[in-house]
Image (spheres, grey):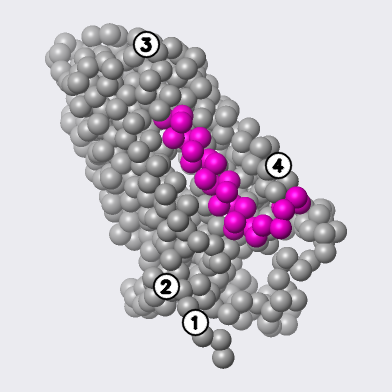
Amino acid sequence: MVSANERTPLLDSPPDNDAPEEQPLSARKSFYSIENRRVLYTIASLCLVLFIFDISNYIAVVPQTAIFEEIVCRDYYSSGFSVLGNTSGDKCKIEPIQSEVALISGWRDTFETIPALLVTIPFGALADKIGRKKMALLGAVGCLLSDLWVRTVCLFSDIFPLRFVWFSGAFQLIGGGATTMSSMIYVMAVDVCPPEYRTTSFSQITAAGLASEFLSVQASAWLMSKNPWIPYLGSSLILITGLILIIVLIPETFVPKDESLMDTSTEENLTHTAESPSWIDCSYPRIRQHISNLGPVFRWMRRNVPAMMIISSFFFANIGRQTAGILLQYITQKFHWTFAKAAFVISLRAVGNLFVLAFLLPTLSELISRRTRLAGEVKDKLLSQFSVVTIILGYILIFVADSPLALSIGVILSALVSAFTVTARSILSSLVDQRHLATVYTGLSVMTYSGMVAGGPLLASSFHWGMKFGDPWMGLPFIVAAGLYVVILLVISMARMP
């Protein structure tokens, strides 16, 4: 009997003759051929759904910051500014107003994340029992209700204080919100893709999100020239469209392990049962049972040090995704630009990331695989380290930039956080048994969104103190972010692959 150690998988590995690396090259090349219609359809559907949801998110980033600023500015001067008009001028760029906008945005992210963290792990365990699609749909409903609350507060800001947007997090209790939905997207990709194609599929899914970022930011900037409320309210309609697409397009990828051993007729019956569970399966005793099943997973994670180190790195990596709002304020303040003009620089981040994920990362991954004998997780570790170093350089350049060109280059470099998350997820997937992927990936989302809990107030506070110290220190949040990525680089470098 083989003794267990910290690198022992939670469940036994499949026999060698089933291992993906034993497949002939011709078989691997035909993975995305017409014969694999289920894989192609699933990945394409996931990309489309993520594309729509990210459009609804990114198209609202710039107008939301502008609307928040205008409401705070109106309240500060008590001069009857019209919230339905165009964005405010230089008189709103003073430190008290900008600090309040950063504070509201940062703490809103925090308060929206905490409730989701309370329910994400149980919902992740539930997805390992009743399916991924149902949990993704429930999370999308929570996102929609949360967004509608924020827009209601802004529309009736003469009745509700703007800080009431902090209560939007209560709706994240419904399905875990974006935390659960994002984890289910990647888990469904893992369900249908063999290990050697995970990095490529992750890149394609993430690239779909980046394409939506570029298009939506440009569209948002154009619509804001007419009225910031057009893209802001339109984002909710787009979110509803994405919810409908989950119902119509996304297939259920979860197949109970015992089901694969049954004959075809039994398989169809079980599939029907898995797709149509009774409501009693979601009752409180059943949820408690699913939570109790997490014990072996957590015990394994304590023993598997490399996996835990990879997971912990996502806590810090999420800081890079939170700098968009601060970056908008930073650009408009530093160069005296309008929000619509500053949005162009934000869109450059998506262009750089799209190139890396759609072309550079898959090409490098394939080149390393063909030219070296490195294991997949070792290859992904090298790519992760390269991405993190580039991100650090980008944040430093944003801090010291004295021209729009230098700042734009820094934005493009710092945007490689998406490339890092792709390769890091691939490493983690190789360390986890597929039966527990939904649970572990949900835990990964918890770690990611925990970074949001800490990162929102941290960046808002550093921006406040940077403005207090004077113009040279206005970019203090980006130095803080660079320091956090130095920690990530150390963590990734110390993680030993099996």
Q: CA distance from mark 4 to mark 2?
A: 34 Å
> Which comes sooner in the sequence, label 4 or label 2?
2
- How many angstroms separate mark 3 from mark 1 (CA)? 59 Å
Is 150 above or below relative to 70? below
Q: Residues within 10 Å of mark 2 (few under 14, many from 20)?
A: some
Looking at marks 3 and 4 on the same chain, the residue that comes earlier in the sequence is marked by 3
Contact (Cβ within 8 Å) of mark 2 with mark 3: no
Q: Is residue 381 magenta?
A: yes
Amino acid type at image mark 1: Ala
In contact (CB < 8 Å): disc 3 and disc 4: no
Q: Residue furthest bottom?
A: 1
Classify residue 53 as left or right of residue 249.
left
Mark 2 vs mark 3, foreground winner is 2
**Which residue bears the numbered disc 3?**
335
Which callout, 2 or 3, points at the residue further toward the start of the chain? 2
Residue extent of the magenta highlight: 369-395
Q: Which residue is mark 2?
A: 303
Residue 344, image x and y in percent?
Answer: 49, 19
Tell me the residue that label 4 is attached to: 363
Task: Tell me the amino acid under the disc marked 4.
Answer: Thr
Cα–Cα gap, marks 4 and 1: 37 Å
Name the residue tied to disc 1: 4
Inspect this view and state whether residue 40 appears: no
Residue shown at 56%/34% (left/top)? 353
**Direction from residue 261 to residue 37 in the image, left or right:** right
Residue 376, x across and y down, in percent = 64, 58
Cα separation between marks 3 and 4: 37 Å
Q: Secondary structure at mark 1?
A: loop
Q: Could you tell which of marks 3 and 1 lies nearer the N-terminus?
A: 1
Closer to viewer: mark 4 or mark 1:
1
